Image: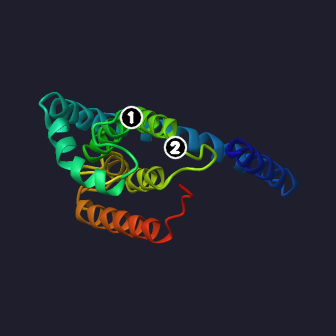
């Protein structure tokens, strides 16, 4: 679906430039955009590499396991459809821990594995159960200690203090997470 939206935007831009005799401006904008995209990726690579390396060291040092153990009692209350020692809950813990540590790339496979494991025991395979919905909310809120991508984008845009937004991101993420969980629990949308 998204590819159709992009294709539509490109087609409309092309038609408007053609009709308004602005093909030169369109060509310049396309080339400038490509240049800026390459510059952005290069400038972000350093910051992302640094923090990914630091987080990998923290993971190998056992920080992931500690956070996972701390999360276990909370997760078992939020997702009562699964035992705390089940494969689904282990994948959920790994996903949330990776997100907390800012390892978004590492979190994705754990999230997919968690949903696959949760679906195996879902009584209604055509719709998610409440625990699956809660997991999606937690994953979407994505509370991170160090949101490296946003900081890297701010630095690439010229910010002299790219990490100054950390408290605001933490507050917003926590409030979003709490709101989402409360709403999901109030509506209890699952039929299981």
| Residue 21, position as x, y percentages in the image | 83, 54
Reading the image, the residue beneath label 1 is: 110
Give the label on residue 138, or none: none
Q: Nearer the viewer, residue 69 or 26?
A: 69
State the residue lying farthest toward the right: 19
| Residue 160, position as x, y percentages in the image | 25, 56
Q: Nearer the viewer, residue 172 or 48?
A: 172
Q: Is residue 128 left or right of residue 60?
A: right
Q: Tell me which residue sits at (60%, 43%) in the image.
A: 125
**Residue 175 visible, this angle:** yes
Instruction: Work out how far the residue at label 1 is from the one at label 2, CA to CA, in angstroms.
Output: 18 Å
- Per the image, label 2 sits on a secondary structure element best described as loop
- The color scheme shown is rainbow
Query: Crowdedness of circle 2 by 10 Å Cα count: few (<14), some, many (20+)?
Result: some
| Residue 14, position as x, y percentages in the image | 79, 48
Q: Tell me which residue sits at (43%, 41%) in the image.
A: 40
**Residue 43 visible, this angle:** no
Q: Nearer the viewer, residue 157 or 163?
A: 163
Q: Are marks 1 and 2 in contact (CB under 8 Å)?
A: no
Query: Which numbered disc, 1 or 2, marks the residue that appears first in the sequence?
Result: 1
State the residue lying farthest toward the top: 60
- Per the image, label 1 sits on a secondary structure element best described as helix
State the residue lying farthest toward the left: 61
Q: Tell me which residue sits at (38%, 54%) in the image.
A: 138
Q: Is residue 106 above or below residue 20?
A: above
Reading the image, the residue beneath label 2 is: 122
| Residue 95, position as x, y percentages in the image | 34, 40
Q: Quadrant of residue 1?
A: top right
Q: Nearer the viewer, residue 182 or 20?
A: 182
Q: Quadrant of residue 189?
A: bottom right
Query: Crowdedness of circle 1 by 10 Å Cα count: few (<14), some, many (20+)?
Result: many
Q: Which is in the foreground here, disc 1 or disc 2? A: 2
């Amino acid at each position: 679906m998204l590819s159709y939206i992009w294709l539509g935007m490109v087609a409309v831009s092309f038609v408007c430039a053609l009709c308004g005799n602005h093909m030169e401006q369109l060509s310049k904008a396309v080339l400038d955009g490509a240049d800026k995209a390459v510059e952005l990726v290069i400038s972000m690579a350093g910051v992302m590499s640094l923090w990914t390396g630091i987080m990998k060291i923290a993971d190998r040092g056992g920080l992931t396991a500690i956070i996972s153990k701390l999360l276990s009692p909370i997760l078992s209350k939020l997702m009562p459809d699964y035992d705390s020692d089940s494969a689904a809950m282990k994948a959920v813990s790994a996903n949330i821990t990776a997100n907390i540590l800012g390892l978004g790339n590492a979190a994705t496979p754990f999230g997919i594995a968690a949903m696959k494991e949760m679906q195996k025991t879902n009584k209604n395979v055509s719709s998610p159960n409440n625990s699956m919905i809660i997991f999606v909310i937690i994953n979407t809120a994505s509370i991170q200690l160090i949101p490296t991508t946003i900081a890297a984008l701010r630095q690439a845009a010229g910010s002299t203090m790219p990490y100054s937004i950390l408290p605001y991101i933490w507050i917003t993420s926590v409030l979003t997470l709490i709101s989402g969980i409360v709403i999901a629990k109030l509506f209890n949308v699952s039929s299981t």
